[in-house]
Amino acid sequence: MPWRLLRSSVEAALGDRHLALTFHRVKPPSDGDGAPGMAIREQDLDGLVDALLATRRGSGERWLSVTFDDGYEDAAAWVDSRASRFAEVEFILFVCPEKAEVGAGFRWDLTEVAMRGGADRRQAERLQSAPRDVDAENAREDLRRLGADPGFRLASVERLRALAARPNVSLGNHTNCHFEMVELEPALAQRELDRSHAAFQRLFGPQRHFAFPFGHRFFDERHLAMLRAQGDFLVWGTRQRPFAAADRAGGALLSRFVVDGRWGVRGALGAIAGRSALA
């Protein structure tokens, strides 16, 4: 599809609605990634943001949100270098506060390390199925060793605080352990949400944004009720659709469009246009 037609398709599909995009890593995608599709090339991310902004130049409204889950250092570095260039974009980094504080990595990165060592993907992914302990997860030695590996490093608390001082950058809570809420007993889910809320506020100040780990299908109304008892901050899911400006009210559940980094700029724009037209 010619660029002009692709851009006009996105413009028509979005209309005057807001769009939030979700990313994780800023690095070249690889077949050996522990979680395929989580990484996007820097030039593809730049091109996608530029192309989207071009559909609504001069609107005077901050309608595009670019969000990153998990708090990786490579994502923080990209936001640090682009926040001024894309001043009309809202950036939100959803971080696991306890992981940021102690440098404990994620289970899917253990999968990648195992595959580097010769394990096949099926064997390596078994590392992600260990019992879930919301009090002990980030004390695991194997996860903390990931924090010393440049390939999996998380942004430090100091780095995140400095980013949050920028006028168009915010931080959000992504829970301490990044467990699927529906896989936890209700009491453990409540503990995870309460502990991460307290840790986030201790480290970063008032919690204004929250994103569920793994997005939709991995939380339900019980977990929303637990969150809404904590305050009227924005809650972000991962349904692939835009939302109206009026939907952005305290306590609302908003949608984010998860971008697979292997799509490229054209593939991502096509997916956004197609899904938005159906929403």
Image (tube, helix red, strand yellow):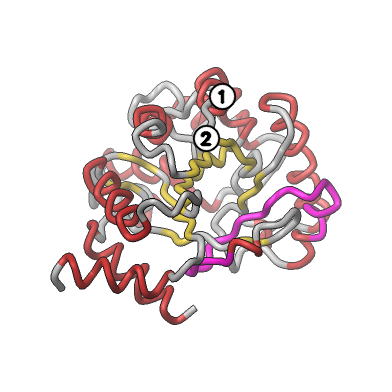
Please indicate whether residue 179 sits to the left or right of residue 192 in the image. left
Sort mark 1 into few (<14), some (14-19) or many (20+) by Cα contacts within 10 Å: few
Task: Verify whether residue 226 appears in magenta.
Answer: yes
Q: Which residues are magenta?
A: 225-244
Where disc 2 sits, the SS reads strand
Amino acid type for the residue under numbered disc 2: Val
Q: Residue at x 75, y 46 (%)?
A: 193
For the N terminus, the image quarter is bottom left
Sort mark 2 into few (<14), some (14-19) or many (20+) by Cα contacts within 10 Å: many
Q: Residue at x 51, y 59 (%)?
A: 256
Is there CB contact under 8 Å for labels 2 and 1? yes
Instruction: Please state the horizontal and vertical placement of residue 49, each as a whole percent of the image.
Output: 33, 49
Q: In this view of the protein, which residue sits in the foreground, 39 or 107? A: 39
Above or below residue 53? Residue 160 is: above
Above or below residue 212? Residue 115 is: above
Instruction: Please state the horizontal and vertical placement of residue 243, each as a whole percent of the image.
Output: 55, 66
